Amino acid sequence: MSQGSEKRSILVTSALPYANAPLHLGHILEHTQTDIWVRYQRLLGNECIYVCADDAHGTPIMLKAEELDITPENLIEDIYKEHKSTFEDYRISHDNFHTTHSEENRILSERIFNALQENGLIEQKKINQLFDTTKQMFLSDRYVKGSCPLCHAKDQYGDNCEKCSATYDAVELIDPVSVISGTKPIIKESDHLFFKLSSLKEQIINWLNNSNIQDPVRNKLNEWLEGDLRDWDISRDSPYFGFEIPNYQDKFFYVWLDAPIGYLASHLNYLKKNDQEAKFEEFWNTKSNGEVFHFIGKDIMYFHTLFFPVMLSESNLKTPNGVFVHGFLTLNGDKMSKSRGNFISAENYINTLDADYLRYFFASKLGTGVDDIDLNLEDFRQKSNSDLVNKYANIASRTAKFLNNNYDGVLSNELDQPELIQEFLDKSEIISGLFEDLEFSKAIKEIMSLADRANQYIDSKEPWVLIKDEINKDKVHSICTTSLNLFRIITIMLQPVIPGFTKKAFAFLNETNISWKSMESPLTGCKINDFNPIITRIDEDQINKLLGS
């Protein structure tokens, strides 16, 4: 991803959480990664709009509503409120959190479908589809399981394999079973609409070669592109909860068609709320200077890097500038599992600890790879206490009392060691580049090395010794002022990562309207507020509580 001197116009999205269950920490990992990058861009002064939405269509939602004896609309409304509240608890700074079950999404889905149809890219075909004779309904991909037809991994859904990432038709599954009734489905014929993806390989390769994609992801996509691409089934039969396809009776848009269009719909809804609807066409036209970046998990990269970009380009709409893919989240080295007791809900975590501890831990692990990220709870506790408390917050707590007690909370007009301030500023260029390139773990290491450097400076100056002699009063004043300016620079660097903790720090420093460039202007001769602890240590009881122990 590129940095430039001109103000950028950026739209950023995270994958849409499905609207039939509470959020889990995997969602929080992805949205935290996205949010850090968004907050960093805003600190630089770029226009960075962050939108998301609930993915609110499909058979699972229809069946869940039946189970609860409520309408699908009531179900997704309740889940929407819960999701929105949870994201706010984790300080995810969405500019707009919408739903795919919206008028904006319906209009845009029909618009894109019609454009594809006009370009001869929609074809009607008779297909063989799995049918549950017990429930008297065609089975959506997520409601049939079997063995992957490519790698033979067991217990895979009917659309893609979580082990080898292959996509396939549900009828290709080996030994399929209906998830709904537990019976073996039959094969039944139906008319479906297909997006002619097979004819668009050249366009996909062109997009891929001109987009920001991680090397491991690009390599995987090239593997898929070596073979023949198959046309994409974009319709589903009634009964189904979703948008009906215009001019086709009892046919609905497959959720994977209207779900990514939900990014555009959420953006349009945001612009409407801000009386800027005209900006939508300006931003999404093919000559736009705006930038679009998607953050997703590795299990859905096929849809975001093959189907969606070419679907947009063939509808004469702007394609994404980049797609950033992350791995799954594990807990203490194993896959999260409620049945095995290796699980932490997003709700349980936030009822136990501040979100910023987890945000910091995720940042310390996130980079440009797609490997899974392990939430080892002992590592989490030690890193939080060592880095955030002993290193970062300690800089302020060690010097603030001198300023509050001896100088009425007013900073010196002089810095004891201006060259040390400059050393930190020089390092900020490196750290800025790491944030830009999504190398968060490397950025955190650099920032913590600065925290170590600041604490070493305080150790070497020993203000607690110097203050005993009145002759050193001015010297101690400038030492403490220098120390707090080092703390301030680190605070600005950490603001995208731990916005709650840094908000307390800026309140102590009596500062508002911070930008990345603010660190270039040291605080001198101004008054700070009384110091109160910014971050407290995590104890073992809190860790045990996370697991329900």
Image: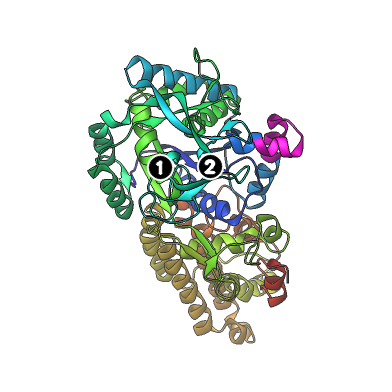
- Split into 4 quadrants, where in the image is the C terminus? bottom right
Is residue 354 left or right of 46 when viewed as pictured?
A: right
Circle 1 residue: 172
Q: Residue 536 falls in which quadrant of the image? A: bottom right
Mark 2: amino acid: Arg
Percent of width and height locating residue 504: 65, 59
Please give the count of numbered marks on the rendered protein.
2
The question of residue 77 being in magenta is answered with yes
Is residue 304 left or right of 14 when viewed as pictured?
A: left
- Residue at horizontal 34%, vertical 47%? 1
Vertically, is 311 above or below 376?
Answer: above
Q: What is the image's colouring?
A: rainbow
Q: Residue 181 falls in which quadrant of the image? A: top right
Closest to the observer, 293 or 76: 76
Is residue 278 left or right of 17 when viewed as pictured?
A: left
Say what secondary structure mark 1 lies in.
Answer: helix
Percent of width and height locating residue 134: 63, 36
Say what secondary structure mark 2 lies in.
Answer: helix
**Residue extent of the magenta highlight:** 63-79
Circle 2 residue: 142
Lower position in the chain sequence, tag 1 or tag 2? 2
Mark 1: amino acid: Glu
The question of residue 344 being in magenta is answered with no
**Closer to the eye: label 1 or 2:** 1
Q: Residue 332 falls in which quadrant of the image? A: bottom right
Is residue 503 left or right of 194 when viewed as pictured?
A: right
